[in-house]
Image: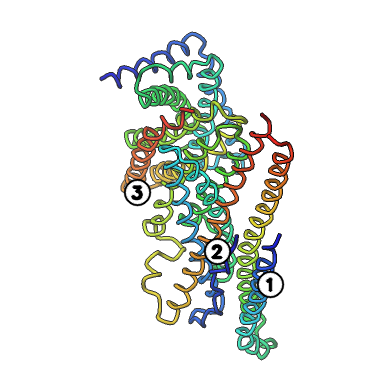
Amino acid sequence: MFMAAPFLIDGAPYESTMGLVQKIFYFHVPSAMTMFMSAIVCGVSSAIYLFKGRASADRLAVAAAELTSVFGVIVLVTGPLWARKAWGVWWVWDERITSTFVLWLIFNAYLLLRKYGGPGSEKLAAGLAVFGMANVPFVYWSVNVWRTLHPKTTVVPTLQAGMRGPFWFCVLAFLLFYVLALSARARLESRRAELEALYLAIEE
Amino acid sequence: MKRHWPVRMFTALIVAVTIALSSAVFAAQPPTAAAQEGFVPVSRTAQQETIPAARLVMIAYGFAWVMLIGYLWSIWTRIGKVERDLHDVSRRINAGGR
Amino acid sequence: MRFVRTAWLVVRKDLVIEARSREIVYTTLFFAVACVLVFAFGFVNEGRPVTDAAPGILWIAIAFSGTLALGRAFERERQSETLRALMMAPVDRPALYVGKLAGILLLLAVVEAIVVPLVALLFHAALFDRPWLLLALLAAGTTGFAAVGTLFAAMLVRARSRDVLLPVLLYPITIPVIIAGVRGTAALLQADVDVPMARAWLSMLVLFDVVFVTLALWTFEPLMTE
């Protein structure tokens, strides 16, 4: 089961120069990065499941989809909280925000499909996930193509020295958390599969 | 299950550190709060602008923590249930002697 | 060439069936017109239509009626179990996909031929100032939408709650296509027509088309087989 948590608890983020509310950045951006990565993991493992038929890939895909949704919620809630202070409004229909929201919807649709699609829905959901993954580059570059309110991706490589430390620390922390949660969730799926197999064995 | 107590310790550790982190965030606030107090009678707009900042940050971080830990907890409870069912079913199989 | 021939046979089959009953064409057309009318009545400002709403309404009507048409087309396949028969035939599976896609595109072309002038009329939108660019935008956008829609509708034929699930799955994926279509059309409708902007959106739509059709061709076979 869970080993001693590799999730390093991040120390309080250091003072930034742009005001207190900018500190949300330290959770908001790593969450977004994790969400995109999770979408890609889901898409890739779905593709593997579709073409190679490996059930373990399908289990990984489900886990990744759930995590995409969870991190998506974090991004979509911390974003407006930051925006309220920085831009004065809760929500703006700019490209990055809208497309992230759409990505989140796609992976929620994946989870809905698996739950309510009936037998055989694993493959269908896998197909959806492949398209969802194709969406990720679109989200990522949308903020560079259109000049919008949302900060561009060039912000990260040019962070000030004081912010870089805590930022990458948070990224690492989120990454470790993600790996932990992913493996736990995938394990849940495989235990469920064992249970199903046992139920089937009983019915003979 | 014999494995419960390390998980409980883990949960307690998470909770303790969350509290520690929240207090650290709290600690970062007094400078801004002190600045606010002095300005209250002079400009109310400054107060309206600065107060939500701290609250928003706290809400944001608190929410993120709740989500992450909540999700881990949901995995944990679901695994617990599946493990119990597995245990029951395998017991039934063994008892049935098939 | 077998690929093209197979696709053509599928299209011909759909056209022949449709020509006999014309059910899908009429219902989809009616639905699209009703959709536009509902929006026209909804978006009225002091008795005059809101011109800015025209691109959005146009593309929403296309999306909604497209979803309806997809659902109906594949429901028909399901009822006669023809999809299974098709899958059992010794032909290229992607050719089947292309055939169905072409059928849907033809249907939507008919719908758009009616809806576009209707929107231009009701919303006083100068849609026909740049007809070729508009045509290109419509073609590219509809292809992108239909490419994903055909794949999803086909794969959902065997699923439960398929009528509800098709929009649930389809709309999030095609929202970028719709957005690009709306923005491109809006660029055409501005007072001083913004041609480079419209071209930019058009190229984005074409990119979507390429990506989606490629992905669909690639995943059609594994998705349709048990």
Foreground: C149 or C33? C149
Helix, strand or loop under label 2:
helix
Which amino acid, mark 1?
Ala
Tell us which disc is closer to us: 2 or 1: 1
Please rate how many residues cluster around mark 2, counting C-alpha atoms within 10 Å: few if below 14, some from 14 to 19, many from 20. many
Helix, strand or loop under label 3:
helix
Residue under label 3: C197
Please rate how many residues cluster around mark 1, counting C-alpha atoms within 10 Å: few if below 14, some from 14 to 19, many from 20. few
Report the residue at 48% width, 42% height from top. Answer: C173
Residue under label 1: B12
Can residue B45 be seen at all in this image of the molecule?
no
Which amino acid, mark 3?
Met
Foreground: A51 or B6? B6
Which chain letter goes with mark 3?
C
Q: Which mark is residue A79?
A: 2
Report how far apart the C-alphas of labels 1 and 3 lie in the structure.
Answer: 57 Å
Which amino acid, mark 2?
Gly
Which chain letter goes with mark 2?
A
- Give the quadrant of residue C8: top left
Percent x, y for residue C198? Answer: 35, 45
Report how far apart the C-alphas of labels 3 and 2 lie in the structure.
Answer: 29 Å
Which chain letter goes with mark 1?
B
